[in-house]
Image: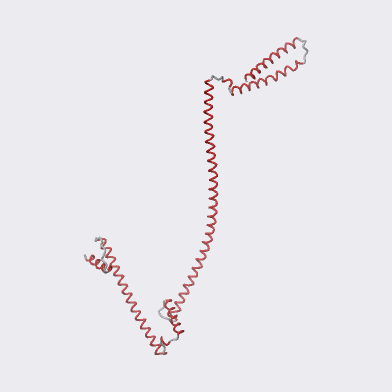
Amino acid sequence: MGDKIKVISWLSTVFGEQPVPQFEVNTRTLDVLSQLAHSSDARCRDTALLIEDMRQKTSEYQADGAHLQDVLLQGVGLSCASLSKPADDYLSALVDNAMVLGVRDTSLGSLMPAVNKLTNEFLEAEKSNRKLERELRALRKRLGATLVLRSKLQEDMNEIVKTQAVESAKVDERLLNMDFVTTKAKELRVRRERAEAQLVARNMDKSITHHAVVQLSEEVNTLKQEIIPLKKKLEPYMDLSPSPSLARVKIEEAKRELAALESQLEMNVDFK
């Protein structure tokens, strides 16, 4: 119950005059809001302490300033109003430098370490800058090589695309030719089957087919080759005298054999 009252009080403080938004009140939400309230109170206390410390330091600085003004006025008779324009400018520049360097005062004991620290930071920054420049040059070099490689790859890709287009056109042409040949083969097969059916219907003799004619031609050539040696056998008898009876018998037999072969040859040729 105490946590709930504390949370509601903290929410009222946070929102001020605005109404506190509605939320589901349960153990989880109360724990979360209680932790937020505790953290907020701790931060507010730290901020208050910091503000009080700054106020105290401001008072100290103002007291130191008044003391230094009194010293200058009483010791050397100087005041801010009596300073010349260049002296006032120098003093303002010195104060600005002290504020930039973040020192407590403008003494050499405070300014020199701050200047040395700033110089070291500047040298480190220059060193880091040189390192970054080297890395940048290396990156530019790699970037140039990458761009060249990218350009080469793009050219190769374009060539591949062109080659693929040409090959695709060739493939399409081959497919068209294949379709034409397939269609033509089907047409010829149908025509052949139709012609065979017509020949069967007309009772065509298979002996006059192309295959049979080729076979007969081969047989004729074989018979011609067989006649050649028979003619050579007759040559010795062609010069003999017709008177001997034996020669006449042999010649008649050879003539009959030759006539039979020629008759068979003529029959084959006529048949062809």
Count of picture labels: 0
Q: Position of residue 78 (x, y in %)?
A: 42, 88
Q: Nearer the viewer, residue 82 or 259?
A: 82
Q: Quadrant of the N terminus?
A: bottom left
Please say if 199 is above or below 69: above
| Left or right placement of residue 20 versus residue 209 in this view | left
Please say if 43 is above or below 160: below
| Left or right placement of residue 27 versus residue 104 in this view | left
**Which of the colour schemes (rainbow, by chain, secondary structure, one colour) is used?**
secondary structure
Q: Nearer the viewer, residue 185 or 14?
A: 185
Q: Residue furthest left?
A: 1
| Left or right placement of residue 248 versus residue 203 in this view | right
The image quarter in which residue 53 lies: bottom left
Q: Position of residue 85 (x, y in %)?
A: 45, 84
Q: Quadrant of the C terminus?
A: top right
Please say if 204 is above or below 72: above
Q: Nearer the viewer, residue 148 or 89?
A: 89
Q: Residue furthest top?
A: 245
Q: Position of residue 127 (x, y in %)?
A: 50, 69
Q: Position of residue 93 (x, y in %)?
A: 45, 80
